[in-house]
Image (cartoon, rainbow, N blue to C red):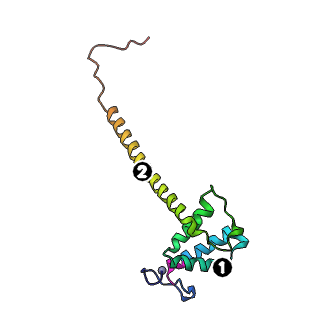
Amino acid sequence: MFYRENEEYVSPQYRRYAHKECAKNFNNIHNLAKRVLKEYYIEQRVNKNIKDFVTNGMTLKEIYDVAYYWYCVQTLEPVFPEKSQGGFGIVPYVLPKYQKYKAAEEMKKKINKGKHIKDYVNKESKKIIFEVPPIKKPRGLNFFILK
Ligand SMILES: [Zn+2]
């Protein structure tokens, strides 16, 4: 995380996450953990999770996204904050599900984009049909006799 990106440097109080973006993501993870784990939240546990997951190649943003997906997006499976041991140990187990979900969401987006283009094309062709000039009424004849 640390020297890889060209991020804005923030105060050294942030300890390991001196980059502004990393510090933000780090805080986001903790704030989410506090929110979803409630009284079961343990700061040191979450710190340990973050350290382990980053060591195994996850980014802070990914850790946040996966935890957010598990606790705040998916509704098919129950979540048990009381079994969390105060942290986000569930994240590596949820990761494959999250990746499937993300891929499906991206597919939906693409399909919707395609639909949008189709609608637009249909509107355009209707417009063209509408613009065909009307048949001219021969002069001097009244075709429409109104009572
Ligand atoms: Zn960084």
Asked where in the image residue 91 lies, by quadrant, the reply is bottom right
Return the x and y of residue 122 as percentages of the image width and height: 37, 39
Asked where in the image residue 74 lies, by quadrant, the reply is bottom right
- What amino acid is labelled 2 in the image? Lys
User: Relative to residue 72, is residue 55 drawn left or right?
Assistant: left
In the figure, 146 relative to 26: above or below? above
Quadrant placement of the C terminus: top left
Return the x and y of residue 128 as percentages of the image width and height: 32, 36
**Number of numbered discs visible in the structure rendering:** 2
134 and 109: which is toward the camera: 109
Name, please, the residue furthest toward the front.
Answer: 93
Return the x and y of residue 50 as percentages of the image width and height: 57, 77
Q: Which mark is residue 113?
A: 2
The residue stretch that appears in magenta: 18-23
Of the numbered discs 2 and 1, the one sitting upstream in the chain is 1
68 and 136: which is toward the camera: 68
Of tags 2 and 1, the one toward the viewer is: 1
Measuring 67% from the left and 69% from the top, which residue is drawn there? 35
Secondary structure character of the magenta stretch overall: helix
In the figure, 42 relative to 99: above or below? below
- What amino acid is labelled 1 in the image? Glu
Measuring 67% from the left and 70% from the top, which residue is drawn there? 84
Instruction: Answer few, some or many: residues within 10 Å of disc 1's Cα (few below 14, many 20 plus, some between 14 and 19).
Output: some
SS for dot 1? helix
Is 19 inside the magenta-drawn segment?
yes
Instruction: Answer few, some or many: residues within 10 Å of disc 2's Cα (few below 14, many 20 plus, some between 14 and 19).
Output: few
Is 29 inside the magenta-drawn segment?
no
Q: Judge: label 2 CB < 8 Å from ligand 1.
A: no
Q: CA distance from mark 2 to mark 1?
A: 42 Å
106 and 120: which is toward the camera: 106
Q: Which mark is residue 43?
A: 1
SS for dot 2? helix
